[in-house]
Amino acid sequence: MNREKAIVLLSGGLDSATCLYKAKGQGYEPVALSFNYGQRHKAELQAAKRLAAHLGIEHQIISVDLRKIGGSALTAEIAVPKGGEHLTQEGSIPVTYVPVRNLIFLSLAYALAESAAAAAIYIGVNAIDYSGYPDCRPDFIESFARTAALASKSGREGHGADIVTPLISLSKAEIAAEAVRLGVPVALTWSCYDPQPSGPNLVPCRNCDACILRRDGFMAAGLALSPEEIYGSPTERA
Amino acid sequence: MNREKAIVLLSGGLDSATCLYKAKGQGYEPVALSFNYGQRHKAELQAAKRLAAHLGIEHQIISVDLRKIGGSALTAEIAVPKGGEHLTQEGSIPVTYVPVRNLIFLSLAYALAESAAAAAIYIGVNAIDYSGYPDCRPDFIESFARTAALASKSGREGHGADIVTPLISLSKAEIAAEAVRLGVPVALTWSCYDPQPSGPNLVPCRNCDACILRRDGFMAAGLALSPEEIYGSPTERA
């Protein structure tokens, strides 16, 4: 029996990996989609590759050079916040914000979905723990779905891809619990914004916002995991 | 006096060049934005470069690899329609359609606009002569503006870039007349989908949909122009 395809945006982090297993669990044939967008380090892209290889699924990597756009600590030489300082600033937009990144990524995903005749696009946005990002909120996602349908042949014909956000209203602890429940190999994922060199490898810093949120999620879920599961395994230096 | 910036999507064609002069005429400091998206030929990118150089304005070129997406005669090995055959098919979507291309391009333009604090984005979409493209219609543009505002810091703060479509309801003849009225150096533009080699150069085929529409536009406007103005000057082979 042929399963319907779903494009899954796979950054290599815990959330997108959980989405991937969710799409699979919901009966889709997942096609992983990652972006080489000029991120300062390639550790998350390596994690995406090892996750797709682990599942034995198709993995597309699209290059889009967001360095020309600038304005973010993830692509330009702006310091990544450490020690959880940002996390205390309720409602502010973090310096790791890349202007309209999810709008760009979802647009590219929609194009691939149309070309591959995929029925759905899974994206692991989350409006709870990291609501500083405007393009992670439900009103944006709903508006995007309407816009993309108008932009596309498939949408105008009434069979555009659905945008699925299974994690949007989960806490980080709930995502951590869901990941473990679905059998996500969490040690293969990567979350850290500020990888540290360690011999031939990069290891998570354990101190940036992303590392702290992830650790706190596993702790709040009461999961006894190894340090590599909590923070992610080393990747090779590019 | 500092003028406000406007990002102008500049493909190098007649319509986008007219938009560029329109933005300038409306008092903006234009920043041209082109995409290196895996188009089969680079003639239009060369035309964009010579237009920006002619005006002496900033020109950003962002690379985004749409070849991975496929499904279009503009990026994949699908034959470009010739002799105006397509033009007789009312309401159909042409094979030169790249899935949600304007959604992708506008998303990247919006990111650049936010990063450069530009007040407007000019895009030369046109819903009249080439209405086969779903992402050239007013309902898409309006929906995009709402979505991008929700996706962005600037939009959430109430000062997101406006999306300006000065050509959307003009016929090709009206665009041709407007281009000449505004002093657009039309011989520097490039429209042809199927450039032909000619010694070290590429020359317009004069027979694809884009060449035919352009020629008919100038003819309907009653403008007596040289062949290089009507079809565009040769560009160098890449």
Image: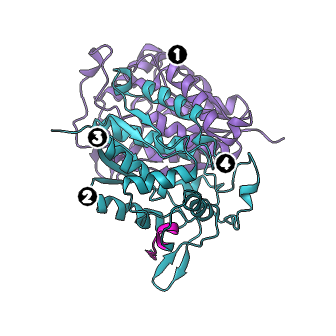
Chain colours: A cyan, B purple
Q: Is residue B51 visible?
A: no
Q: Label 3 belongs to which residue?
A: A27
Asked if both marks, 3 and 4, belong to the same chain, the answer given is no
Q: Which residues are magenta?
A: A228-237
Q: CA distance from mark 3 to mark 4?
A: 40 Å
Q: Chain of mark 2?
A: A
Q: Is the residue A72 above or below the residue A202 in the image?
A: above
Residue at 38% x, 43% y: name it: B234
- Camera-near label (4 vs 1) is 4
Comparing labels 2 and 4, the label whose residue is closer to the camera: 2
Between circles 1 and 2, the one closer to the viewer is 2
Q: Which residue is mark 2?
A: A56
Residue B128: give x, y in percent of width and height: 44, 16
- Mark 4 touches mark 1? (CB < 8 Å): no
The answer to which of B32 and B71 lies nearer the viewer is B71
Q: Earlier in the sequence, mark 3 or mark 2?
A: 3
Task: Indicate whether residue A233 is drawn in magenta.
Answer: yes
Q: Are marks 3 and 1 in contact (CB under 8 Å)?
A: no
Q: Determine the chain carrying the residue at label 4.
A: B
Q: Is residue A79 magenta?
A: no
